[in-house]
Image: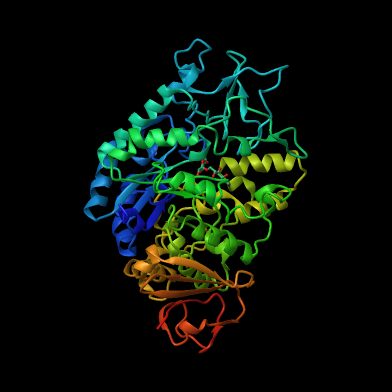
């Protein structure tokens, strides 16, 4: 299995809630996705990753599951899902689901039973601990603000929740819990599902003594993350899952792993490890956040050499040892063009440049819905328009504990809030961008009359056509799949240049991350080389490229 299918695949992430509504309730649904399969086929992607589609009270938009074997009412029925799977497969598209098993919803029957008291048969499905002196077991901070422990009135004990208090953590130490998870995975795989994106996969195993972490200045909490990421039994659990379930199906798996380095990453996705096929690391999207006063909400500036250093380290670190996943954004991140490009004057050029630079690296690329249109961040007028639990909780803490005013909070949210990625997909210039005939669950980005799929498909110069061309090109070039990666000019402040090469082909990829013209000397072997991709009509300079704002070119050595 040196060339498994997922090494050639391009994945497209769908956030079902915001993709396409088919019944006018303002929420996207499965029948809406079916309607858009031909669009996705035309783009040239191979795999659709659906963010959670299961029954959920939607405290965290489906990442809080109350029934793993049922479809969220707003999204449709099991029959709709089966039809989606059939229709996708008929077009040669695969479907990957989101496996959210670090936690459930507090409305999951397991938790309802667990919560009944220390004698409940399901007590041990979750993590219950006694506090001391009226305080929680430790002072770890949750991802969504506040303590990870919630005191339950019935027993006076605390349950663990790394995310919201409505997302209690499952107890992976309990073999019965693991068996339930494996059964549920088989349920979907037997229907014909082609893979899993595994939510927060490196958090399943916690040190059972729950040691105290480093204090977080200005709060009563401690930093538990380093202690519960990549916990003591995590690889044992994943190897068991592989043995019990994954090894019996031809599927692809990608683990979401914040806080892993390439060395740790290889432990999750090393070819011989029997765990996962690849991981999402966060090093390029979290750059500087840890050092910033209020983390991502302070939105520390990004420097290109840091981004290059991180991505190059992963490229070389996993080459021949594991497999990379490539992404600029997803449903938790701001829009790629707004974060790494220029979402105003050079929106089209910079969105195309980001496409080129990402898709010529080694690994499986993930395109987040709307990225192929160059969709941008949104700036809602006030906090009232925001829906995301992380954003709303953080905004409260920033206001009440750190004295930030609304303008300052909004600046952080505009730059980094998760709702940037969650506004409805832009299909057309018509009512609600063609997303819904009803009232959309969250506001639209007002720029949809200019930026939408219908206009993009009709315009050969659009970001969409660039994505389609680059997807087709990377598939035609085996060097992109297997070739070595060499970063050039690591310290160059505005140019991201690298070489991909194998025994047959050498490619030079140059991306100019700047709104002013620039120059870049062409390495000798590429002088006079064939231009395989260019986001401008022409290319100037023979020995030295004269780069236009956000220009990106790919040259093949003679
Ligand atoms: O979103 C983040 C930063 O803004 C991350 O810290 C994120 O919380 C983390 O990567 C885990 O994300 C995943 O699990 C969460 C869910 O809210 C996210 O949408 C999901 O991608 C809990 O299930």
Rendered view: 320 above or below 77: below
Can you see residue 72?
no
Q: In terms of depth relative to the viewer, which is nearer, 255 or 168?
A: 255
Rendered view: 545 above or below 193: below
Residue 240, located in which quarter of the rendered image?
Answer: top left
Q: In terms of depth relative to the viewer, which is nearer, 265 or 283?
A: 265
Looking at the image, which residue is at 42% across and 84% down?
Answer: 529
**Which quarter shows the C terminus?**
bottom left
Q: Where does residue 130 sit, x and y in percent of width and height? A: 63, 17
Looking at the image, which residue is at 48% across and 30% down?
Answer: 105
Can you see residue 229?
yes
Looking at the image, which residue is at 44% across and 53% down?
Answer: 321
**Residue that protrudes farthest toward the left in the picture:** 90
Q: In terms of depth relative to the viewer, which is nearer, 477 or 484?
A: 484
Q: Which colour scheme appears in the figure? A: rainbow
Q: Where does residue 458 sit, x and y in percent of width and height? A: 36, 72
Q: Where does residue 432 sit, x and y in percent of width and height? A: 44, 56
Q: Where does residue 149 sit, x and y in percent of width and height? A: 62, 26
Q: How many marks?
A: 0
Rendered view: 545 above or below 56: below
**Residue that protrudes farthest toward the top in the picture:** 119
Looking at the image, which residue is at 63% across and 51% down?
Answer: 413
């Amino acid at each position: 299995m040196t060339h498994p299918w997922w090494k050639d695949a391009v994945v497209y992430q769908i956030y079902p809630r915001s993709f396409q509504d088919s019944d006018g309730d303002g929420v996207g649904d499965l029948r809406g996705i079916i309607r858009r399969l031909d669009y996705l086929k035309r783009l040239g992607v191979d795999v659709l990753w659906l963010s959670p589609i299961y029954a959920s009270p939607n405290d965290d938009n489906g990442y809080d599951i109350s029934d793993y074997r049922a479809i969220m009412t707003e999204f449709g029925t099991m029959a709709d899902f089966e039809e989606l799977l059939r229709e996708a497969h008929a077009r040669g598209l695969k479907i990957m689901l989101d496996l959210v098993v670090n936690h459930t919803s507090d409305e999951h029957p397991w938790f309802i039973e667990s919560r009944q008291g220390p004698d409940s048969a399901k007590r041990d499905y979750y993590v219950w601990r006694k506090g001391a002196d009226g305080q929680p077991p430790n002072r770890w901070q949750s991802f969504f603000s506040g303590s990870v422990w919630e005191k339950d009135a019935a027993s006076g004990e605390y349950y663990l929740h790394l995310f919201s208090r409505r997302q209690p953590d499952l107890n992976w130490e309990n073999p019965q819990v693991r068996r339930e998870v494996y059964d549920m995975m088989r349920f979907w795989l037997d229907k014909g599902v082609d893979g899993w994106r595994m939510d927060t996969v490196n958090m399943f195993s916690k040190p059972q003594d729950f040691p105290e972490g480093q204090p977080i200045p200005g709060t009563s909490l401690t930093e538990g993350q380093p202690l519960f990421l990549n916990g003591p039994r995590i690889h044992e659990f994943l190897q068991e899952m592989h043995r019990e379930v994954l090894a019996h199906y031809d599927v692809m798996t990608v683990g979401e792993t914040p806080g892993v380095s390439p060395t740790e990453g290889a432990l999750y996705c090393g070819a011989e490890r029997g765990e996962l096929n690849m991981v999402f690391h966060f090093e390029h999207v979290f750059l500087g956040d840890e050092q910033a006063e209020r983390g991502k909400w302070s939105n520390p500036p990004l420097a290109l050499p840091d981004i290059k250093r991180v991505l190059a380290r992963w490229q070389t670190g996993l080459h021949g040892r594991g497999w990379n996943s490539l992404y600029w954004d997803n449903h938790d991140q701001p829009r790629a063009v707004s974060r790494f490009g220029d979402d105003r004057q050079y929106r089209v050029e910079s969105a195309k440049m980001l496409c080129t630079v990402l898709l010529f690296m080694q690994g499986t690329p993930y395109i987040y819905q709307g990225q192929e249109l160059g969709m941008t961040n949104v700036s809602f007028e006030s906090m009232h328009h925001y829906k995301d639990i992380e954003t709303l909780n953080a905004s409260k803490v920033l206001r009440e504990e750190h004295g930030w005013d609304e303008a300052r909070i909004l600046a952080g949210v505009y730059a980094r809030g998760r709702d940037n990625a969650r506004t409805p997909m832009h299909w057309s210039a018509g009512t609600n961008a063609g997303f819904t005939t009803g009232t959309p669950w969250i506001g639209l980005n007002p720029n949809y009359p200019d930026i939408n799929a219908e206009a993009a498909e009709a315009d050969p110069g659009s970001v969409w056509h660039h994505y389609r061309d680059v997807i087709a090109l990377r598939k035609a070039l085996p060097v992109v799949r297997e070739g070595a990666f060499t970063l050039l000019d690591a310290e160059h402040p505005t140019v991201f240049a690298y070489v991909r090469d194998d025994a047959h082909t050498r490619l030079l990829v140059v991306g100019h991350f700047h709104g002013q013209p620039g120059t870049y000397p062409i390495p000798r072997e590429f002088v006079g080389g064939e231009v395989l991709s260019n986001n401008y009509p022409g290319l100037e300079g023979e020995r030295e490229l004269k780069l236009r704002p956000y220009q990106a070119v790919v040259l093949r050595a003679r």
